Amino acid sequence: MIDLYTWGTPNGRKVSIMLEECALPYRVHAVNIGKGEQFKPEFLAISPNNRIPAIVDGEGPGGKPLSVFESGAILIYLAEKSGKFLPADPARRSDTLQWLMWQMGGFGPMLGQAHHFLRAAKEKIEYGINRYVEESKRLYGVLDGQLAKTPYVAGADYTIADMAIFPWAARHEWHTVDLAAYPHVKRWFEQVGARAAVKKGMEVPFLN
């Protein structure tokens, strides 16, 4: 059994989607980041950077419990544990990891900054809004260019790269992006969003 510590955010939903796709048994522990529960000592023991998601695998390597934090690291761990959604072929594996890192380093942090300046900042700072909305649109352009060439983000097969990107793209309205302007992203978004495991994973932990 895997214990998933999460909240209703794109990063949290990457992992619940992966767990559903792999059909791995898991328990959900909601960590209410709005109430500061991510700073509790018992959570920091699992995720020292006070960020969700995190997991504890009761049957980790050697049968011993293992905790993992950082959503990208969790996706890689679960892919290696299950043998799914991360190709064994070195070239295809490299492609998948490149796009996963693209999401972790850009198509997450930049969209998150757009959300902050558009929705959370007490003052509307035009410079911040313009900077991060435009960067979000640039990143969508990069993604659209890739998906013009291939069915899924990292090639012909659905991988953890798709799972990492999808929950952020699901909030396209939050960063004022119209998917109609990115037809290949729109096609991919509808295709991935139709998967039963994605639908179920996006409902965890039942908020937002």
Image (cartoon, rainbow, N blue to C red):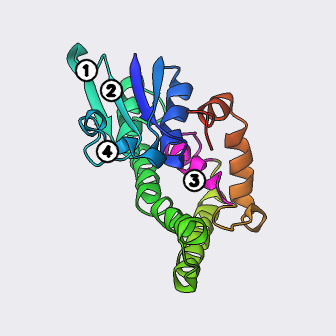
Secondary structure category for the residue under label 4: helix
Amino acid type indicated by mark 2:
Val
Labelled disc at residue 168 = 3
The answer to whether residue 38 is above or below residue 136 is above
Residue receiving disc 2:
56
Measured from the top left, where is residue 4 in percent x and y? 42, 29
Labelled disc at residue 65 = 1
Tag 1–tag 2 contact (CB < 8 Å): yes
The answer to whether residue 204 is above or below residue 104 is above
Could you tell which of marks 4 and 2 lies nearer the N-terminus? 4
Bounds of the magenta span?
A: 152-172
Report whether 22 appears left or right of 82: right
Secondary structure category for the residue under label 2: strand
Amino acid type indicated by mark 4:
Phe
Q: Residue furthest bottom?
A: 127
Looking at the image, which residue is at 74% across and 65% down? Answer: 178
Can you tell which quarter of the image residue 115 is in?
bottom right
Measured from the top left, where is residue 104 in percent x and y? 42, 55
Q: CA distance from mark 3 to mark 4?
A: 24 Å
Report whether 180 appears left or right of 26: right
Could you tell which of marks 3 and 2 lies nearer the N-terminus? 2
The answer to whether residue 190 is above or below residue 65 is below
Residue 168 is a magenta residue: yes
Amino acid type indicated by mark 3:
Trp
- How dense is the environment of label 3, judged by Cα within 10 Å: few (below 14), some, or many (20 and up)? many
